[in-house]
Image: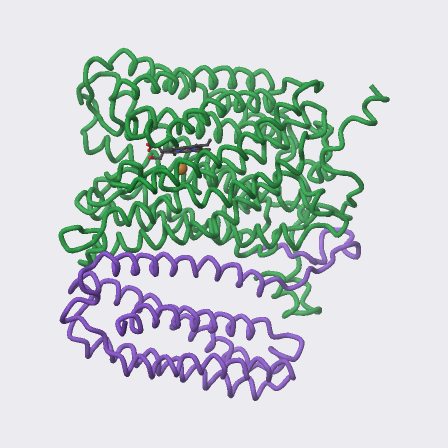
Amino acid sequence: MAQANLTDRGAGNFSVHHHPEKWKWYDYFTFNVDHKVIGIQYLVTSFAFYLIGGLMALAMRAELATPNSDLLDPNLYNAFLTNHGTIMIFLWIVPGAIGGFGNYLVPLMIGARDMAFPKLNALAFWVTIPAGALLLGSFFFGGAQAGWTSYPPLSLITANTAQSMWILAIVFAGTSSILGAVNFIITIWKMRVPSMDWDQLPLFCWAILATSILALFSTPVLAAGLVLLLFDINFGTSFFKPDAGGDVVMYQHLFWFYSHPAVYLMILPIFGIMSEVIPVHARKPIFGYKAIAYSSLTICLVGLFVWVHHMFTSGTPPWMRMFFTVSTLIVAVPTGVKIFSWVATLWGGKIRYTSAMLFAIGLLVMFVLGGLSGVTLGTAPVDIHVHDTYYVVAHFHYVLFGGSVFGIYAGFYHWFPKITGHYLNEGLGKLHFVLTFIGTNLTFLPMHQLGLQGMPRRVAMYDPQFQTINQICTFGAFLLGVSVLPFLINAIWSWSRGAKAGGNPWDAKTLEWTTDSPPAIENWEVLPVVTQGPYAYGEEHLTVE
Amino acid sequence: MQGTVDSNSQSAGDAAIAHEEHQDLRVLGLLIFLCSEFLMFAGFFVLFLVYRAEAAAWPPEGTEVELLLPAINTVILVSSSFVIHYGDVAIKKGDVGGLRKWYLITAAMGAVFLCGQIYEYATLGYGLTTNLFSNCFYLMTGFHGLHVFIGLLLILGVLWRSRREGHYGAEKHTGVEMAEIYWHFVDIVWIVLFSLIYLLTLI
Ligand code: HEM
Ligand SMILES: [Cu+2]
């Protein structure tokens, strides 16, 4: 790892220490160890996967415009279904929010020149590439069919080769998360500028810290489950084959022990983005700094003990249903604490309705809806009725699209000037927001109704009575497809031609804004000194403005 | 790879200022990583215990485990953890010769352990796919064996590097320490594994 090599090589070998004044375009395609290069690599790659996963979703919605299976071969539908979910989770939101924003911002926010282990960091990025290649390549073998959860026995009896490639892909993606998590924990713990106390740590860093702890403890358990699945498929074992004494429900336990925390992997960094964007654009100190910081840690702790709420219908004994209903309802509390804090921050603020802020407010609205449907699902008596219906699909798209994707967009608009030195165009940004907001609600709100009426999820064909609502969803989905265009055009155009942004375009207080935009390699000539909290807005503005 | 950025690189402009070096955090990083590794084993342990509880007979008739050889193997692996520690103590006093001696013995003990395990596999009357118990048995011991093998490679790596004069010294031995920590980890996992797979059959 880099810093050790330095001491090993000692003085006298200056060429090793040399880096150019500025990275060239092709440096972004190499095994570069600069955290900002890696952050951009993550952001761009994950966004590309977002587009791929999005096209799969559009194909599915097109199929669902009519009750019959007339557009896609049903097996292809299943493959799209599986890979859409997998790509969105493991190759878009997790690497985008944690790998992308986390890598770019954490060192800048804590006054460090890089992450603790730069080479490990680059490695963590590059192992996501084979993960993507395996998933896309699996289509040559029919594509995995068993959904992103890959429950046996379905995953044991369909498309064996593609399913095995799927497993390897997740193992690669998981390795990347674990390596990233180690790096973030040590970086935030040990590499803050000496003048920064824990209570001056920006909330985004708190969120990444909590995320990393969660990833560190849950990912390996998923890996264990998947290794067993791989053996069952390829090497004749019977861990999950009931006819030979195996137990399918054990897979579900191993899977959800990871994958419930995985939903927090996808939302905690977004909470972090919210806690940065809202105070800056509301010009107010964040309300309840400590409550937000500690509620991330609470979520990550309690979140490890709620996984069975995904399994209420898996022959789960009553005491388990009881226990996990209660723990699930408890985990909603720290989430609520954050929502209240953000609303209180907005309250009475001098709100600037920038695109970043619009996406943050949109997130608040949609995420509350997703959280409420989550609470209903967490209650076993309700869940038994709506499990595996479109109600669940509606729930998780409200939290994942309305939450995570909106948050990433808010982050894009907020930090794009830092990353590129240019603003994104606000007009296009607002168009993007309006289209996305309408599209998301049009697509996913009616799904609640579909689910309550009993339409099962993961099907290419459905009862004709559901057709009208499905067509609304399909229309909304295509609107969402269109909504990406203004963003893409905006990002590509503004990257070099947008209005020039200075070092601190939003007049913000966290450390990343104390250096140039884009920051020099190694971030600062002289490290900044922390003299006030990260959200100390107000005092001087009251007198100046 | 070109253009690595280092935390104290002497380049681009005014290098004298504030290009401070941060402390070596690799040992801490390894410890945190091992917590994660341990949870992977923990997943297997839990699975094993659940299957044990669910089964009528565990291990089922015909797939009983051998006890003597694994017990000897356990003694070897556990004592190698003490041996490797002497190597660490030696290098902290700047004694490279001592480091090499103790690490070599550890490597030999690790190799004996692996050979013992392969011998056990070869002489057992059942294989990976015989039944659920043998599935668990081979998967868990095999996965652990893989970790022993990686630990062995790390130790050999230390030995290889220690040939160079001054590569390790009283103040400079992070690599030595990391190999040692990893070896202890492999050892601890084995103790749990041995208790679960072998000792529990005695009850
Ligand atoms: C207030 C907090 C939340 C609660 C109480 C909650 C509760 C639940 C419950 C009980 C289920 C299982 C429904 C079923 O399968 O029958 C579920 C599914 C799901 N939730 Fe949440 N949830 C919450 C927040 C979130 C968040 C923040 C995310 C992600 C960002 C999320 C993502 C998901 C996903 C992806 C599924 C579906 C998994 C699948 O079966 O494919 N949830 N949620
Ligand atoms: Cu959950």
Residue at 18% x, 60% y is B56
Q: Is residue A109 left or right of residue A299?
A: right
Q: How far across and how far down the image is residue A280, in percent?
A: 68, 28
Residue located farthest toward the right when viewing the structure as drawn = A543
Which chain's colour is purple? B
Way the structure is coloured: by chain
Q: Quadrant of residue B139?
A: bottom left
Tell me: A140 left or right of A482: left
State the residue in front, A9 or B203. B203
- Determine the residue located farthest toward the top in the rendered image: A468
Image: A233 above or below A433: below
Position in image of residue A88 (x %, y %): 40, 35
Q: Quadrant of the C terminus of chain A?
A: top right
Tell me residue A156's x, y (percent). Answer: 20, 47
Judge from the rendering whether residue A76 lies leftward or rightward of residue A332; answer left or right.
left
User: Residue at the spot x=74%, y=58% of the render?
Assistant: B20
Question: From the viewer's perspective, is residue A304 above or below residue A71?
Answer: below
Could you tell me how many numbered marks the image carries?
A: 0
Residue A406: x and y in percent read 51, 26
Tell me which corner region of the image, top left, top right, bottom left or bottom right, holds residue A227.
Answer: bottom left
Image quarter for ligand 1: top left
Q: For chain A, what colour was chosen?
A: green
Residue at image point 26% right, 52% down: A229
State the quadrant of the N terminus of chain A.
bottom right
Vertical placement of residue A541 versus A27, above or below: above
